[in-house]
């Protein structure tokens, strides 16, 4: 089997390249690529429990805790004890966490342009459909 021609190999290679582009892009606004996804969830619903963020992101609680450490340290979020359970905490966006959204959306738009450069409208549509299907099937 020629591993370098398998879908899994090509997908992994594209994923690594894209993740590196994402990292470079968000570094410009003081974020790490993993932090982006936590912020996206908090922009949907602020004040989520840490355990719920982990479940929504498909990450382990310790991984989310590490990501939150960076966001807390750079004042993008704050942590507060959950009213009903002293062991559980809620994560809230700070003003800086709200304010970084516009910058992130601008960086994301540039990344999107880079990602689909050279593809036709039909190829973009097909790629999006295939990625959604893979995400559902694998998720």
Image (cartoon, rainbow, N blue to C red):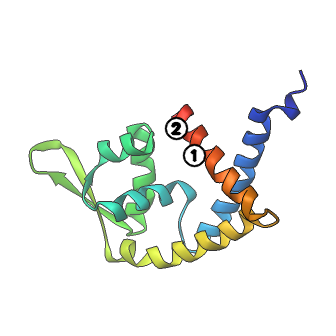
Q: Do callouts 2 and 1 mark residues in contact (Cβ within 8 Å)? A: yes
Q: Residue furthest top?
A: 1
Name the foreground residue: 116 vs 65: 116
Q: As drawn, is 138 to the left or to the right of 17? A: left
From the top left corner, tell me how far across and down residue 138 is, in percent: 56, 32
- Kindly identify the residue that appears in the image at 73 percent across and 59 percent down: 122
Task: Say if 39 sits above or below 101 in the image.
Answer: above
- State the image quarter where residue 22 is shown: bottom right
Which dot marks residue 132? 1
**Residue beneath the point at 57% across and 58% down:** 33
Q: Quadrant of the N terminus?
A: top right
The residue tagged with tag 1: helix, strand or loop? helix
Instruction: Label 2, secondary structure: give it.
Output: helix
Near-viewer residue (23 or 131) = 131
Alpha-carbon span between mark 2 and mark 1: 6 Å
Q: Residue furthest right?
A: 2
State the residue position of label 2.
136
Q: Horizontal and vertical percent for residue 59?
A: 45, 40
Q: How far across and down, in percent of the image, does residue 116 sit?
A: 73, 63
Q: In this view, does 16 lie to the left or right of 70?
A: right
Residue 91 placement: quadrant: bottom left
């Amino acid at each position: 089997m020629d591993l370098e021609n398998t879908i899994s190999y090509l997908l992994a290679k594209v994923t690594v390249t894209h993740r590196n582009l994402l990292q470079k892009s968000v570094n410009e606004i003081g974020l790490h690529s993993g932090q982006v996804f936590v912020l996206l969830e908090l922009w949907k619903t602020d004040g989520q429990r840490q355990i719920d963020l982990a479940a929504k992101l498909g990450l382990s609680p310790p991984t989310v805790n590490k990501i939150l450490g960076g966001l807390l340290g750079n004042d993008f979020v704050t942590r507060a004890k959950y009213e009903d359970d002293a062991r559980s905490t809620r994560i809230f966006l700070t003003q800086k966490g709200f304010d970084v959204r516009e910058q992130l959306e601008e960086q994301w738009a540039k990344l999107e342009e880079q990602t689909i450069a050279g593809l036709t409208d039909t190829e973009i549509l097909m790629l999006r459909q295939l990625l959604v299907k893979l995400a559902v099937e694998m998720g």
